[in-house]
Image (spheres, rainbow, N blue to C red):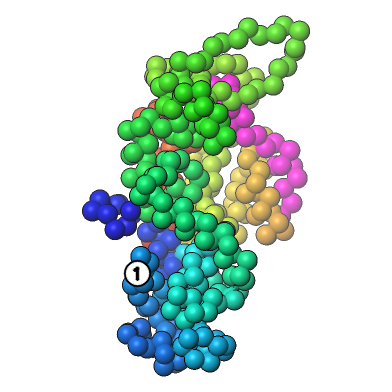
Amino acid sequence: MLKSEESFEQTEYYKLLLKFETKAFENYCNNFAEIQDYKEGVLKKGFEIIKNCSLHLAEFNLQSKVILKNEGKSSLGKFFYEPVIFLGSNQISKENHLELAYLGFLLEKIQNKFPDKGLIIDKEGGKHRVELAKLKKPLKVIISEIQSFDKAPPKLLLNRHCSQCLFENSCKSQAQKEDNLSLLDRITPKQINKLEKKGIFTVKQLSFIYKPRRRNKKVKNPPILYKPELQALAIRTAKTYIQRLPALDRKSIEIFLDIEGLPDDGFFYLFGILISDNDIQNTHSFWADTQQDEKTIWQGVVTLLERYPGTFEPSAFEKLAKRYQTDIEGIKKRFININSFIYGKIYFPTYSNGLKDLGKFIRGKMGKRKSIRFTDNHLA
């Protein structure tokens, strides 16, 4: 895809990761008095560290920011090179391990020695040694599958990793043209495979198989199940469907809370609070310009919420309470997840119940990645 003539727009999140990755690379290089830039023939000279490696190997290309020398026999001499990759986040995934193993696979073609280990440098400069030998076999299977793409292109399937990918916009645009089932946020690959075996390949086709069922009066509280076919019907008809009315216990004073953060850092930079007191609404925004400011806004949020009865989303509160040793037991008892009133009960004509999709539906303008991008620039 990268070699094709089609142009790809970098997403804001991808740009952010790339920025942090470049910074991690530069900081790592600053620890060395001398680093050799790659050029033809430099590998055989046995430099301790080589940067900006770029080699063409038949049907493969080796692009590596850094490789490190290690002792051991190879076609280069009594030494060989190990791969290093840099991340724009602090979370290391299985895909990162495979990327490192892939560089090891290419280095083997040059030095006739598969490196036993590789190194991952995270956003904060943390070093993580990775055993590569156990990844060699699954890597070859993946490479074989990729090499067969010309004959059998992979099936388009949107997933949670899309936001980190350079091709997000391209794949989403193609999915919309196909009316791809994976556009539905809650549908699983297993459900998609099951539907395709029945000859259902699009959201529109899925919308026609919805059949409302009579409620069994003998069962007082039947379980709420998400029905992708009803979601598809809502999208096709541009209508909102209610499978069951949510039981809302309304209060004279209600508090609505939303939290924004950088998930890779565990840093919460914004608490947005709306307080509705007998239909009079007031909003409060608590911003942290730096991670050092997080404690200050956290204390302000807790102080404000303790003055009002209400319920709130728990996970961020639990993390911050532990981080800053704050007693929030009284607040925790009031937590409520608003999405629990929607999931499986109300079907909006949107692909997901995310704030961005629902915001567009009610003519709002929302975008989490733009918020993250803005925050990164602001903190810089």
In front of the other: 104 or 141 = 141
Relative vertical location of residue 204 with respect to residue 167 in this rendering, above or below: above
Relative vertical location of residue 248 with respect to residue 35 in this rendering, above or below: above
Disc 1 crowd rating (10 Å Cα; few below 14, some 14-19, many 20+) is few
Query: Does residue 51 appear left or right of residue 160 in this picture?
Result: left
Give the main secondary structure, helix, strand or loop, of the magenta stretch.
loop
Q: Range of the magenta residues? A: 326-353
Residue in view at x 41 percent, y 60 percent: 16
Q: Secondary structure at mark 1?
A: loop
- The type of residue carrying mark 1 is Ala
Relative vertical location of residue 290 with respect to residue 148 in this rendering, above or below: below
Which residue in the protein does label 1 denote?
58
Query: Does residue 202 appear left or right of residue 97 in this picture?
Result: left
In front of the other: 250 or 64 = 64
Q: Position of residue 121 (x, y in %)?
A: 52, 72
Q: Is residue 250 visible?
A: no
Q: Is residue 147 magenta?
A: no
Q: Is residue 208 visible?
A: yes
How many dots with numbers?
A: 1
Identify the image quadrant of the C terminus: bottom left
Q: Position of residue 342 (x, y in %)?
A: 57, 26
Residue in view at x 66 percent, y 43 percent: 314
Q: Position of residue 43 (x, y in %)?
A: 41, 87
In front of the other: 285 or 335 = 335
Relative vertical location of residue 332 with respect to residue 199 in this rendering, above or below: below
Residue in view at x 41 percent, y 75 percent: 65
Q: Position of residue 258 (x, y in %)?
A: 53, 42
Residue in view at x 40 percent, y 81 percent: 51
